[in-house]
Amino acid sequence: MIINSLELYSFRNYEKETITFDNSVNLLYGQNAQGKTNVLEALYIAATGKSHRTNTFQDLVQYGKPGFEIHLTAEIDGRTNTILLKYSRDRGRYIEINGIKRDKMSEILGTLNMILFSPETLEVVKGSPSIRRKFLDILLCQTNRQYLYYLQKYNNLIKNKSVALKKWKTDKRYEDVLPVWNEQISVYGGKVAFLRVNCVEKLNEYMKKEIGYIAENKEVSNITYKTYCTFDKNCDEKYFENELKLKLAQGINREFELSQCLIGPHRDDIEILLNGRNSRHYCSQGQQRTLALALIISELLFIEEVKGEKPVLLLDDVMSELDSKRREYLLNSLYDVQTIITATDDLPFDNIKNKKVKKMQVVNGKIVC
């Protein structure tokens, strides 16, 4: 996959700008607060339907304007693909994929495959379980349309069940309804857990190799999926469904007591270990950066295996977070991968071996060279 061009209208600090990209390394450089990250944000929205910086599209509209537009053109398997995304303060969101209007923003997932690596990516290694679940969900939604459907069904069921648990305190009729909902929660929750487990196992294989390369075989990583039941590699989808059904039946009284959905994939986590120790508590900042770097490259390899094409890699001000050894490793790993990088200075990118670098200076929402 290759991004050819991006057009922005009234988006953040861009009034009207068209940016064309080379199929190798593209560098957006300039001083802070000029709009470099805004470009990556627009690209990420075109791929996922969501911003990685805000949950509110109103925040993306240029001051004093009624809305914004994002137009993206990409080449996938030799075919031109287009994304048109509009937002109006009055009319809300509007999206077209290849000229066809779509009703839901989630339909954009899987059309374009992009990976974002930013300083915030470190939170996947050292942050809360919800951040790791979100990382996994975005990856799976981009590579498996069925997963998106299962996840949406599961989340809607959990949302309704949460409301019912709270209402039960004053309306005991819900006591008969919840076991029926738990049947459906088991079906979709089992599918979600099964697909997540398989994804983490594949990421783990890739990550072990990448850590070995980066750390010169001096350190060993391991990532495992922590869910509501024990399992092994021979467990199928039905196993996860049956185990969830059992756990929900056993825990229903506790859920009534606390008025919370206590069991299911919405509470799961990924445990990331380095040399057998939990990375959240026992790793140095340098080790956490190494794990984040290896995880991003593993994500890239996973998408390539599943989709049969390399995704686009977005690197937002990460070179300053990596030492020279890790920077070199990252850049050398980007063979035949279209990469869009933001940085404050273009000098570190003068000597990238065997790579053409298109440099674009960003000044106050304008590409000036």
Image (tube, rainbow, N blue to C red):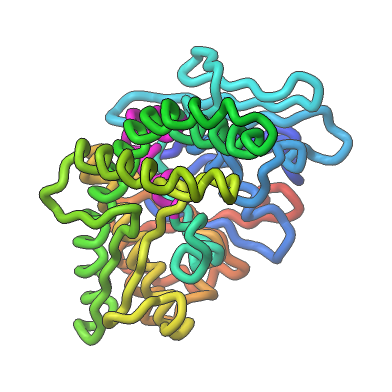
Seen as rendered, the residue at the extreme left is 234
**Whole-percent x, y for residue 5 in the image:** 51, 36
Q: List the single residue furthest toward the right.
A: 64
- The N terminus - image quarter: top left
**Residue situated in front as seen by the camera: 336 or 101:** 101
Dominant SS in magenta? helix
Is residue 50 positioned above or below 294 on the image? above
Q: How many marks?
A: 0
Query: Which residue: 36% across, 29% down?
Result: 183
Query: Does 31 sit above or below residue 165?
Result: below
Is 321 one of the magenta-colored residues?
Answer: no
Q: Does the image show residue 73?
A: no
- Quadrant of res 58: top right
Quadrant hosting residue 62: top right
Residue at 11% from the left image edge and 49% from the top image edge: 234
Viewer-nearest residue: 49 or 327: 49
User: What residue lies at 52% left-to-right and 63% top-to-bottom?
Assistant: 128
Question: Which percent across, then down, holds residue 53?
Answer: 64, 51
- Name above or below for residue 158 compared with residue 292: above
Residue situated in front as seen by the camera: 118 or 291 = 291
- Residue 324, located in which quarter of the rendered image? bottom left
Residue span colored magenta: 133-152
> Does the segment drawn in magenta span residue 147?
yes
At x 45%, y 85%, the residue is 284
Q: Position of residue 3 (x, y in %)?
A: 44, 38
| Extreme residue in the front direction | 172
- Of 211 and 223, nearer the camera is 223
Q: Relative to residue 339, is residue 231 drawn left or right?
A: left
Could you tell me if residue 303 is visible in this image? yes
Q: Position of residue 232 (x, y in %)?
A: 16, 55
